[in-house]
Image (cartoon, rainbow, N blue to C red):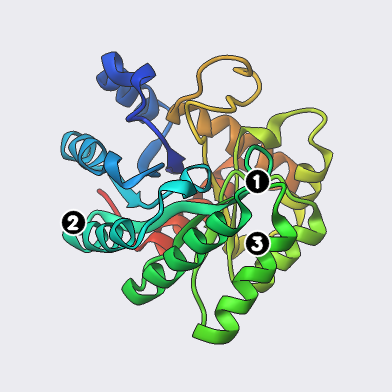
């Protein structure tokens, strides 16, 4: 059985001293590839060095919405240049909108729109972060697509309602579930996990955040994506093996990942 963790941040300091042990644990749980997300382009060298160390790591470059105040034409140009500089860059992001912690709506929308444009020019998917902003995000993407054509991507660490889920599916996006789906009271996430079409479903950890049950409250890590997959399989009434095969194929399709031996 093979799993792909489609959203990790293993460049964070909490992992620095034990990357080799981390790999041993993810291999033990059947995790064969990882997509490393990016909070800001300044992380690029650090993330690419991790990919040098672990060939199963592909990665993204982009600016998180909570860093949108630093978005400039120069940073936009740098992001696009970096994305073209390394064949292991498989996505732009993470980008998106987050109105939970920040109120710089205009800055966030500008940075998101311009990263959508970069992704479209480079024919790469976007990794989208969305918190307390689903309506605005759907409207913005819909407008972008009407004016510029389709752009592909994934709603990562998804926590939206079934209605919001369907709106994102209608835009052509994949939906990725994290440890949130294992939480007992996450009823709308459970409902959303049941309605995503088989060919649009992904799993992730978003480590080191949001460790799934039974590791809730601890530091998250890629090996724990198996707990996410188990819960999504349970909700969809399929076997873990079927869920793993489906989500692994979907990840390879969206991110153009090579099939590893």
Mark 3 or mark 1: which comes first in sequence? 1
Q: Are marks 3 and 1 in contact (CB under 8 Å)?
A: no
Relative to 258, residue 149 above or below: below
SS state under label 3: helix
Residue 241: image quadrant is: top right
Classed neighbour count for the residue bearing mark 3: other residues with Cα under 10 Å, few (<14), some (14–19), many (≥20) = many
How far from the left and from the top, in percent, is residue 38?
38, 44
Note whether residue 53 is visible. yes
Residue under circle 2?
A: 86
Relative to 46, residue 96 above or below: below
Give the side of residue 89 with respect to residue 93, left or right: left
Q: CA distance from mark 3 to mark 1?
A: 14 Å
Residue in view at x 35 percent, y 76 percent: 121
Mark 3 or mark 2: which comes first in sequence? 2
Residue depth check, mark 1 versus mark 2: number of the one nearer the observer: 1
Q: CA distance from mark 1 to mark 2?
A: 34 Å
Classed neighbour count for the residue bearing mark 2: other residues with Cα under 10 Å, few (<14), some (14–19), many (≥20) = few
How far from the left and from the top, in percent, is residue 12?
36, 26
Residue under circle 1?
A: 103
How far from the left and from the top, in percent, is residue 155?
58, 55
Residue under circle 3?
A: 137
């Amino acid at each position: 059985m093979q799993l792909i963790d489609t959203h990790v941040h293993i460049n964070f300091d909490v992992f620095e001293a034990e990357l080799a042990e981390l790999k041993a644990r993810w291999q033990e749980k059947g995790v064969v590839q990882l997509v490393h997300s990016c909070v800001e382009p300044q992380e690029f060298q650090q993330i690419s060095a991790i990919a040098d160390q672990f060939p199963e790591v592909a990665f993204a470059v982009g600016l998180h919405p909570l860093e949108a105040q630093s978005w400039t034409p120069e940073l936009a140009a740098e992001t696009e240049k970096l994305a073209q500089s390394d064949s292991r860059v498989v996505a732009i992001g993470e980008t998106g909108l987050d109105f939970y912690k920040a109120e710089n709506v205009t800055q966030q929308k500008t940075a998101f729109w311009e990263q959508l444009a970069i992704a479209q020019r480079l024919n790469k998917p976007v990794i989208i972060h969305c918190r307390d902003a689903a309506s605005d995000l759907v409207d913005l993407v819909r407008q972008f697509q009407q004016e510029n054509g389709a752009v592909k991507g994934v709603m990562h660490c998804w926590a939206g309602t079934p209605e919001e889920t369907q709106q994102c599916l209608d835009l052509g996006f994949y939906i990725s579930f994290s440890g949130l789906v294992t939480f007992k009271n996450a009823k709308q996430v459970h409902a959303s996990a049941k309605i995503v079409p088989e060919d649009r479903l992904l799993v992730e950890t978003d480590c080191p955040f949001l460790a799934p049950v039974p590791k809730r409250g601890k530091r998250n890590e890629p090996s724990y994506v198996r707990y996410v997959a188990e819960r999504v399989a349970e909700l969809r009434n399929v076997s873990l093996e079927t869920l793993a095969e489906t989500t692994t194929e979907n990840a390879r399709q969206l991110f153009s990942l090579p099939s590893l031996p």
